Amino acid sequence: MKKNFLKICVLAAVVGFSSCTKDLDRMPTNSTTSDIAYGTLAGYKQVLAKVYGSFALAGNNGTSTSDLAGIDPGQADFLRLYWNAQELPTEEAMCVWNDPGIPDFHYMNWTSNNVLLAALYNRALFHVTVANEFLRESTDDKIASRGFSGKDADEIKTYRAEARFLRAFEYWVLMDLFANPPFVTENDPIGKYIPPQTTRAELFKYLESELLAIEPLVVTARNNEYARVDQAAVWALLARLYLNAEVYLGKGNGKYTEAITYSSKVINAGYSLKTDYKGLFLADNNTANPEVILPIVYDGVNMQNNGGTTFIINAAINGDMNPASFGVPGGGWGGNRSTSALPGLFADKTGATDKRAMFYGDKPEIVDVSQFAEGLRVTKYRNVTSTGVTPPAPGGAFSSVDFPLFRLAEQYLIYAEAVKRGGTGGNETTALGYLNALRQRAYGNTSGNISSYTLDFVLEERGRELYWEAFRRTDLIRYDKFTASGYVWPWKGGVKDGRGVESFRNVYPLPATDLTANPSLKQNTGY
């Protein structure tokens, strides 16, 4: 076990909430009464850890259970579901498996019956539900009634602010992918309450006000425990929210000045780029890592599931790649690889080498989509430490690589893009410095430095810097390239050379099952 807060996450999983599906108004049940569970400061922290653990855990008992009904536990964790929805419909990844729902992504022909989209939607709502329950139990009245005062009461209020952030993050996910989800907070009744539908514009305003309210309530930047929310995480999500404001609010409603303001707050908070890019994605990336702002934590011994970075690593390699060299001697599932468009982003006419390009194979073109050997495999994530040690894991397939939800490099790229899109309060000279800092790390010298840049260059640089980190779908939509016929990649839309698809696919459908269960919901246009 490598992370202290993770120990509490594991305990929380053992005594944690039982299964909860799509009902936002449902209270997660617990064999321990609320007054006992929340009777001590340690008890509050343990339940808070379950709110965090809902990112990384599929259920309460490792690989065998799921918080969600109707989905294999191996596919039920947040990151695996989110990664599929963000990467598989883009040029960055294509999967050989024919599991229900997977081929729909790259062919861009999903429907409201896609089981993986429904699971992601339900996973995000489950996380909202868990956060809401913690918030109901951490009001000022509840804290006082249980005898907390002074520093202990203040500590619980900090926990409460962190839970609000985690809920806000999941509402951002729902807004970004599904646009118009149901909405409920801790102030709404529990029972037969039917959650009303919100709109993207309403949810954007809520998230903006909620994050601004949370900002002064959480621990200052870089001063919380590892993998817990601090002010920098709040600023980072605000910067991401503002960068995409025209997607959420409509053309002409950009908030690029605000994106510059909040990315700058992160940049000036004392973070720095990790010297070695590949070290960001190793099993000891929780140590000596000044770049990561907030990760999802994984541990191969005490926090096992077949999602998360276990999925990202194993699905990208096969037996012919020596899985032991990737820290998963019992793994190697042979599923995901890139299309030729991803390695194509790294082509450099000067002959200089961008060390971020981490691929395996000699057949970049995919002719037969069922052949894992076609398309270059991505070797960016490895379950080994920087000294080459493989962490322990029963069965030899589980990963201890933490996944960065926010890191400094993204904030550099947000700043540069927001400046180029006309935001005020920044300048291109500074933006160039940030872009060249990324490129100097990538090349190991100044051979890749640039003297000017375009918006399209930023998109390409985001592809080189952030590939396989679950950004690409959102990025392509912001650039009007996701569904467009003017920007295609192999097998986009189910055609070998790629084709444009209907623009309504910039938003995913609300699951048919939830439309049936909640009559207040109206399906997104086109589905």
Image (spheres, helix red, strand yellow):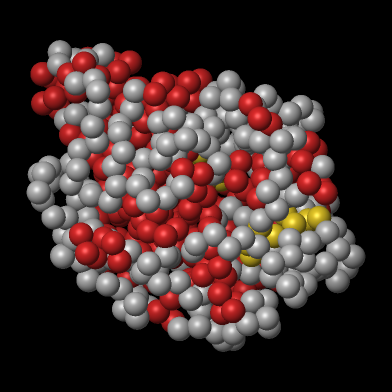
| Quarter location, residue 276 | top right
| Quarter location, residue 471 | bottom right
Q: Position of residue 138 (x, y in %)?
A: 20, 28
Q: Position of residue 324 (x, y in %)?
A: 78, 36
Question: Most extreme residue toward the right, as rendered?
Answer: 351
Q: Position of residue 312 (x, y in %)?
A: 62, 48
Q: Nearer the viewer, residue 240 or 472?
A: 472
| Quarter location, residue 395 | top right
Query: Is 275 situated left or right of 232 in this image?
Result: right
Q: Position of residue 494 (x, y in %)?
A: 59, 79
Which residue appears at 34% of the width and 61% of the height? 175
Q: Quadrant of the N terminus?
A: top right
Query: Is 416 situated left or right of 371 in this image?
Result: left
Q: Nearer the viewer, residue 478 or 38?
A: 38
Q: Is residue 355 above or below residue 146?
A: below
Q: Quadrant of the C terminus?
A: bottom left
Q: Is residue 420 above or below residue 205?
A: below
Q: Is residue 214 visible?
A: no
Query: Is 156 situated left or right of 143 in this image?
Result: right
